[in-house]
């Protein structure tokens, strides 16, 4: 296991005293601050250039710590027993100890207990819950390595803890619960099917696949704004592999473009900068690579990037959600023309 007690103590002291630190989790790297400190929470928004109405997720060391900052219920503890520590965030009514600056003025707080040992050590040693959105500039692909954090936050934060690449590669599943129902606000590694093993009444918010309606409040990070985007324009192609190949090659005649494709397709796009998303049927590997690939697009010096439109089934829904936001809902092919 990664272990540097000096670095962990330094990170914990900085957070406890009000500074921001780049910290690893199993999902993506987070920009951590003392969740009890309103000023520190505001500094997160400033460092990221994050819209003020986009709430933060508060990370705790053990599931029972939720009772200190929120009003829990039986369903919370059933979910905690099954999925915590892990990549699941649960929205609950907040207690006053959590400042409104952390929750974008909402009366609820998003709570997560990461499974990553380094993240949990930092929370435990700091003695405070840690508010931590992804440690990237707002709108950019989330960071899945310390290098990504450095590229976005060098000179802005005093410390980044490097514990290697993230295992999951996309942010946690975010859900809001009542006494007997769950609504999925952001998909992740914990799928709706998995949640139904604990609670029969699980629905998926329309905002997972569609844009928020005019005036609709964002209850979860990642719901409202264009996110995860490379500097070049990303387009998703709705079609089979032959249709995908035809569309990309036609576009390449007129545009300086790149393609993100399956490993099995790499030889099809001679002369076009090509990045491998992983094997066609390996959704876990595709998910893990996603943000790394979107960042690598910026190194290719192209104007446009084309990728497959993911499925909305099972774990692929998390990929669909991130990519549809990264491309600002620009889909071509199929019924989209």
Image: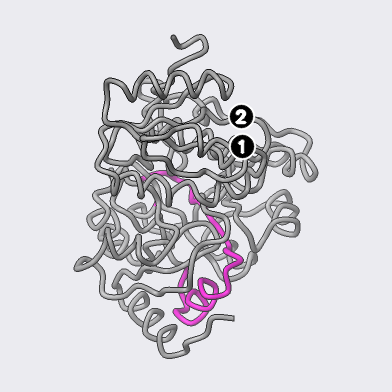
Q: Is residue 219 left or right of residue 253?
A: right
In-front residue for pair 67/152: 152
10 Å crowding of disc 1: few (<14), some (14-19), many (20+): many
Provide residue 249's location: percent of width, then percent of height: 40, 23
Q: Residue at x 56, y 31 (%)?
A: 310
- Label 2 Cα crowd, 10 Å radius (few <14 / some 14-19 / many 20+): some
Q: Which residue is rendered at x = 47% and y = 89% of the image?
A: 5
Q: Toward which corner of the image does residue 230 lie, by quadrant?
A: top left
Q: Residue at x 66, y 47 (%)?
A: 190
Is 40 left or right of 191, judged from the image as shown? left
Q: Which residue occupies the foreground of this view, 185 or 63?
A: 185
Q: Horizontal and vertical percent for residue 127?
A: 47, 78
Residue 142 x/y as whole percent: 40, 51
Quarter holding residue 98: bottom left
The extreme left residue here reads: 155
Q: Quadrant of residue 240?
A: top right
Identify the residue under disc 2.
312
Q: Is residue 112 magenta?
A: yes
Residue visible at 70% across and 56% down? 83
Q: Which region shows up in magenta?
A: 103-129
Q: CA distance from mark 1 to mark 2?
A: 6 Å
Q: Which mark is residue 316?
A: 1
| Residue 92 visible in this rendered orientation of the protein | no
The location of residue 204, given as percent across then percent down, is 61, 30
Can residue 321 be seen here? The reply is yes
- Given contact means CB atoms under 8 Å apart, are the residues at marks 1 and 2 in contact? yes
Q: Which SS class for mark 2?
A: loop
Secondary structure of the residue carrying numbered label 1 = helix
Give the answer, above or below, for where 237 lies relative to 95: above
Q: Which mark is residue 324?
A: none
């Amino acid at each position: 296991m990664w272990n540097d007690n000096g670095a962990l103590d330094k990170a914990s002291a900085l957070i406890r005293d009000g500074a921001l630190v780049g910290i690893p989790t199993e999902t993506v790297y987070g920009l951590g601050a003392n969740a009890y400190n309103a000023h520190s929470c505001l500094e997160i928004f400033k460092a990221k250039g994050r819209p003020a109405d986009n709430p933060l997720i508060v990370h705790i060391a053990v599931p029972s710590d939720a009772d200190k900052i929120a009003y829990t219920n039986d369903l919370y503890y059933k979910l905690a027993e099954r999925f915590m520590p892990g990549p699941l965030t649960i929205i609950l009514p907040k207690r006053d100890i959590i400042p409104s600056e952390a929750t974008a003025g909402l009366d609820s707080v998003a709570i997560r207990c990461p499974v990553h040992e380094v993240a949990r050590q930092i929370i435990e040693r700091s003695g405070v819950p840690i508010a931590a959105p992804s440690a990237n500039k707002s709108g950019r692909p989330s960071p899945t390595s310390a290098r990504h954090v450095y590229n976005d936050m060098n000179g802005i934060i005093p410390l980044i803890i490097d514990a290697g690449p993230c295992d999951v590669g996309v942010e946690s599943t975010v859900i809001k619960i009542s006494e007997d129902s769950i609504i999925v606000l952001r998909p992740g590694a914990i799928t709706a099917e998995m949640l139904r093993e604990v609670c029969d009444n699980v629905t998926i918010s329309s905002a997972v696949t569609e844009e928020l309606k005019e005036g609709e409040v964002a209850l979860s990070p990642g719901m409202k704004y264009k996110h995860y985007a490379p500097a070049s324009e990303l387009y998703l192609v709705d079609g089979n592999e032959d249709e995908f190949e035809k569309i990309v090659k036609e576009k390449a005649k007129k545009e300086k473009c790149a393609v993100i494709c399956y490993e099995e397709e790499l030889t099809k796009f001679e002369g076009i900068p090509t990045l491998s998303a992983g094997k066609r049927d390996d959704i876990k590997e595709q998910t893990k690579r996603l943000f790394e690939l979107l960042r690598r697009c910026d190194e290719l010096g192209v104007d446009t990037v084309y990728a497959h439109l993911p499925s909305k089934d099972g774990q692929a829904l998390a990929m669909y959600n991130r990519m549809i936001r990264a491309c600002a809902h620009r889909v071509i092919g199929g019924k989209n023309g």
